[in-house]
Image: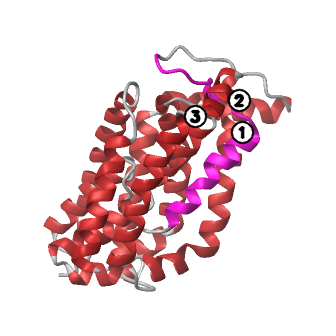
């Protein structure tokens, strides 16, 4: 068997959690199988074509669906707002503005991902590289928390309309187009196994004056179309020859990933109402260094 149902459950759970926690799902999809000694899975991760990539397609789609379900009310307003702006050719409401912020924020990673995802994965989706980038991810999270406390960032936040959250910060809808491109474009770094998509987007959101809660919310909204599009784009791999022998495991893994992602996003939205990225930064550095010692 190419991948067992037990492995599918474990990897599905890890995908659902680490895609949203700022600790890199791609990095963990490389490191965890290596720690468990699942060498066939590790080798398949960086192959040009493999059963494991087909398997991951289902997990990504399930994760995106979980995000859509959790933020369903916001997505309904955003989509309605988008069509309203297309008819009126004006942006009059926060939901209409959010729709276009998400669009412009998604374009950079979409273009770069189509051009370089395959190359970056085959080169860097290996245990030693993933350990290095996971450690670097932790340092980025530490740096983001340090930078958020700088007077210049506090002044930037204070110069815009404020929200009603306990933590000081600008309203999410006050972001400019350039801010959205900056935050959304940071997702490009997550093409390297070990760098977290939610981590880098939260850090850049904090740098533009958002508080932790809104930085997390914007990160999850930005991630949804990217994860869903990537999964659907690669769906033929699961339906084609690469998916032979793993479709049942993919279904089980997808169910686990979807449930884990839903619980994770629900937890994280509440967590970041009062807490910071520091615990995740510590985790990344500890696990990254330990993995580097083990596999380096």
Q: Nearer the viewer, residue 56 or 194?
A: 194
Instruction: Please tell me which of labels 3 and 2 falls first in the chain.
Output: 2
**Bounds of the magenta span?**
166-191
Q: Is residue 286 above or below residue 87?
A: below
User: Residues under labels 3 and 2: Cα distance?
Assistant: 31 Å
SS type, badge 2: helix
Quadrant the N terminus occupies: bottom left
The residue drawn where x is 75% and y is 40% is 177
For label 2, the residue is 96
Instruction: Please tell me which of labels 1 and 3 falls first in the chain.
Output: 1
User: Would you say residue 171 sits in the magenta stretch?
Assistant: yes
Dividing the picture into quarters, in which one does residue 14 lie? bottom left
- Horizontal and vertical percent for residue 36? 16, 72
Q: Which mark is residue 150?
A: 3
For label 1, the residue is 100
User: Residues under labels 1 and 3: Cα distance?
Assistant: 29 Å
The residue drawn where x is 19% and y is 72% is 35
The residue drawn where x is 26% and y is 70% is 291
């Amino acid at each position: 068997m190419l991948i067992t149902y037990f492995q599918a459950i474990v990897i599905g759970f890890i995908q659902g959690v680490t895609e949203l926690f700022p600790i890199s799902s791609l990095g963990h999809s490389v490191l965890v199988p290596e720690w468990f000694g699942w060498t066939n899975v590790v080798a398949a991760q960086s192959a040009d074509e493999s059963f494991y990539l087909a398997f991951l397609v289902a997990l990504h789609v399930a994760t995106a669906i979980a995000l859509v379900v959790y933020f369903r009310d916001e997505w309904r307003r955003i989509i309605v707002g988008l069509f309203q702006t297309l008819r009126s050719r004006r942006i009059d409401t926060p939901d209409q503005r959010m729709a276009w912020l998400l669009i412009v924020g998604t374009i950079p990673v979409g273009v770069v991902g189509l051009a370089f995802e395959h190359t970056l994965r085959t080169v860097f989706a290996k245990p030693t590289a993933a350990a290095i980038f996971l450690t670097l991810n932790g340092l980025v999270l530490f740096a983001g928390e340090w930078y958020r406390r700088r007077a210049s960032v506090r002044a930037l936040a204070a110069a815009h309309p404020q929200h009603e959250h306990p933590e000081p910060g600008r309203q999410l809808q006050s972001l400019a187009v350039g801010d959205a491109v900056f935050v959304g474009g940071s997702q490009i770094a997550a093409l390297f196994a070990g760098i977290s998509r939610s981590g880098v987007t939260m850090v850049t959101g904090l740098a533009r004056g958002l508080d932790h809660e809104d930085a997390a919310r914007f990160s999850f909204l930005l991630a949804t179309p990217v994860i869903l599009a990537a999964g659907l784009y690669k769906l033929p791999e699961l339906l084609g020859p690469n998916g032979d022998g793993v479709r049942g495991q993919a279904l089980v893994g997808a169910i686990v990933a979807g449930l884990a992602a839903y619980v994770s996003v629900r937890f994280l939205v509440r967590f970041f109402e009062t807490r910071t990225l520091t615990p995740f930064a510590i985790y990344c550095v500890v696990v990254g260094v330990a993995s580097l010692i083990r596999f380096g």
